[in-house]
Image (cartoon, rainbow, N blue to C red):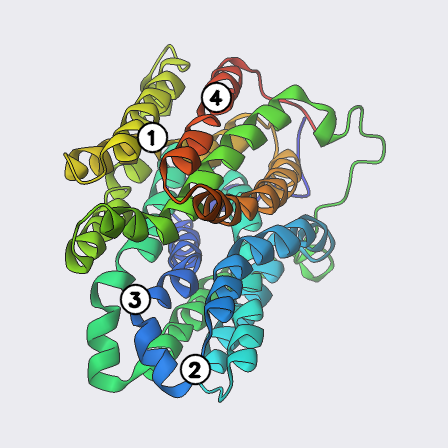
Amino acid sequence: MTDQLTEPPARLKRPWRGRLVVLAGLVLIALNGRIMVAVVSPIIAHIKVDLPLTHTDESVIGMVAPLCFAVFGAMAAGIGRRFGLEATMVVALLVSAAGEAGRSMVATPAWFIAWTVPALAGAGIGNVIAPPLIRKYFSDRVTLVTGVYTFFLTISTSLPPLFILSIANAAGWRFSVGIWAVIGVAGVVPWLFVMRSLRLMLGPRRSMPSLPTPSAPSVPIWRHGVTWAVCAVFTVNCIIGYTMFPWLPHLLTDAGLSIGRADMYLAVFTIGSLPGALLTPLLIARVKRLWVLPVVFFAAYAVSLTGLALNPARLTMLWILVSRIGDCFFPFVITMINLRSTSTRGSIAMSGFIQPVAYSIAVLGPWGFGALQTLTGGYHIPMVAMIACLPIQLVAGILVARARAIDI
């Protein structure tokens, strides 16, 4: 199916020429994607000096991320169709920047949580809009550009915790939280240039084409089996990620490790995803038997999570590093959103359905893990429950690898 209203003019599709500004815009979207989640936990003690955050407040802050990604991600597809991907992304970045700046100036925990919502709302919209933007401008280089995007998205999660504490010690927690609004503001600039270029090329009447819904879609996106398969892979990976990030330090310290070592392993847990984020899309483009990748990722998750469940204080570094191979399911899914759709319209439909559903379910991950830990007094049962989700991810991953692209 041709997608004349959603594909950029031919002049933007020459190899890299005219698209470097788009690539810069995608990199800044990725950098903005997780920073507002990653910067709070390492400096929570500094924040508590000014704001009397309770354990309940901290739990709410932890749950706001997947909830915002789900709610505002569900809205993103419709907004993108109505106003265009580029304009939607500009607004999302500005909303995110406003939230990041706003929560650095509050005086109460309630306002800190309230300003966290727009900070994450913009990121949630960006999660959904970014894959269709990649499809729209880089349909000939989907895997390569997706690798770049997921690499910088992983950076936005993994690198800030390494130096955010030093910034807070030197300039205070308010500066160390608010300074990241600069990325959101900077991210607007490339897209304004793109919108201006489109306006000049297409003329005033077609300056910013929207993404109209097809007049008579043969089958809704949610009725395609591949959609649910991609959704299942992404859901399980979100559950593991959003559960392990807050609970891994507790698992390790309760096993006898020091707080310092537990924090170090958490840093490795986040940074260790960087190679896979960059390499997985490239492997997808080169591996003939694509189903092998989900099998390898599944085996890595199964071995590493089992090791952490049985004896987290022994061979800890090995289990953490092996688990990062399992986390390659994330760039696998982001790439497949584009490879299993034939148009920008299909990409935004799939992305707009899969991500909100996955994040909605992922909210239950850390809550359920904590409930089982409280009920049993240990971590074996919660870890077993998480491991029990892996066969779903394996089967769904193989189905995605073997499926054909759907035409929406």
Q: Amino acid at mark 1?
A: Gly
Q: CA distance from mark 1 to mark 2?
A: 35 Å
Q: Residue furthest right?
A: 216
In contact (CB < 8 Å): disc 3 and disc 1: no
Q: CA distance from mark 2 to mark 4?
A: 41 Å
Secondary structure under tag 4 reads helix
Q: Nearer the viewer, residue 242 or 8?
A: 242
- Position of residue 101 in the picture relative to residue 379 (left or right): right
Q: Which mark is residue 42?
A: 3
* Among the 4 quarters of the image, the one containing residue 287: top left
Disc 4 marks which residue? 397
Q: Nearer the viewer, mark 3 or mark 2?
A: 3
- Badge 3 or badge 2: first in the primary sequence: 3
Badge 1 density bin: few <14, some 14–19, many ≥20, Cα 10 Å: many
- Position of residue 224 in the picture relative to residue 93 (left or right): right
Query: Residue 140: x and y, percent?
Result: 45, 32
Disc 2 marks which residue? 104
Disc 1 marks which residue? 326
Q: CA distance from mark 3 to mark 4?
A: 34 Å
Q: Residue at x 40, y 15 (%)?
A: 290
Q: Nearer the viewer, residue 351 or 269?
A: 269
Q: Residue at x 44, y 57 (%)?
A: 33
Secondary structure under tag 2 reads loop
Badge 3 density bin: few <14, some 14–19, many ≥20, Cα 10 Å: some
Q: Where is 88 relative to 13, above or below?
A: below
Q: Which mark is residue 28?
A: none
- Badge 2 or badge 4: first in the primary sequence: 2
Badge 2 density bin: few <14, some 14–19, many ≥20, Cα 10 Å: many
